[in-house]
Image (cartoon, rainbow, N blue to C red):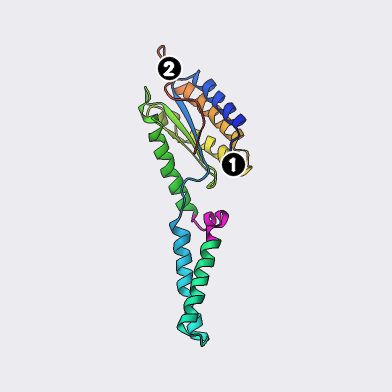
């Protein structure tokens, strides 16, 4: 998803942005926010349960033959639905967005962004498979900037992912988040780097 060279570039962009603000920026990139195991499995089971009925109504096959056909269909669907592209395509977009949002909230908490001095931490979260991006800003900065500013950054980042240029999108997102932080959370006399600047890849 993100090459080692791109990680270095993004880390440097975080470092440069944080020199102008008391805020902290953390970038987390994951291949997929959730495994979504239940939905394809349930769909395959549902289809397999429907298979015997037309065979019962329109054929003279015995129960053992029908059961064998049902088993073959269930195994075949399990293989097809297990293919990553098909697997993800079966999951409704609303569920993918909800799971990705939940994952972003967990990452915000786990990386200590809610414990920074001044509560000005900002998480830039990307789930590649879902083509989902989110920015979570802590209470010390979120309301000052307003949701529209963050939404513009997210829209640009999602478009970069759609064009398969996530690194470029992340570089712009870090820069623009840094501008917002510099305006609303300027550095103080005792400002220090509280969180690592490296890109977190999951």
Asked if residue 113 is positioned above or below residue 126 in the image, the reply reads above
Name the one closer to the observer, 47 or 120: 47
Q: Is residue 191 left or right of residue 129?
A: left
Quick one: quadrant of the N terminus?
Answer: top right
**Observer-nearest of 148 and 42:** 42
Above or below residue 121? Residue 69 is below
Q: Residue at x 47, y 74 (%)?
A: 50
Residue 82 colored in magenta in the image: yes
Element at label 2: loop
Is residue 33 within the magenta segment?
Answer: no
Q: Secondary structure at mark 1?
A: helix
The magenta segment is 81-92
Sequence-first disc among 2 and 1? 1
- Please indicate whether residue 166 sits to the left or right of residue 24 in the image: right
Which label belongs to residue 89? none
**Which residue is the site of mark 1?**
161
In the displayed orientation, state which residue is furthest to the top.
Answer: 189
Task: Give the residue pinned by disc 2.
Answer: 192
């Amino acid at each position: 998803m993100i090459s080692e060279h791109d990680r270095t570039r993004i880390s440097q962009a975080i470092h440069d942005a944080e020199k102008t603000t008391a805020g902290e920026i953390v970038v987390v990139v994951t291949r997929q926010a959730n495994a979504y195991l239940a939905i394809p499995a349930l769909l395959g089971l549902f289809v397999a349960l429907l298979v015997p009925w037309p065979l019962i109504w329109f054929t003279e096959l015995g129960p053992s033959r029908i059961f064998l056909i049902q088993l073959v269909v269930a195994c075949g669907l399990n293989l097809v639905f297990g293919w990553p592209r098909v697997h993800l395509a079966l999951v409704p977009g609303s569920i993918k967005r909800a799971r990705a949002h939940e994952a972003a909230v967990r990452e915000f908490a786990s990386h200590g962004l809610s414990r920074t001095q001044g509560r000005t931490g900002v998480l830039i979260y990307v789930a590649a498979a879902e083509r989902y991006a989110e920015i979570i800003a802590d209470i010390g900065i979120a309301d000052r900037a307003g949701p529209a500013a963050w939404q513009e950054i997210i829209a640009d980042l999602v478009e970069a992912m759609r064009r398969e240029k996530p690194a470029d999108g992340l570089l712009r997102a870090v820069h623009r988040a840094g501008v917002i932080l510099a305006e609303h959370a300027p550095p103080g006399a005792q400002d220090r780097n509280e969180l690592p600047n490296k890109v977190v890849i999951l």
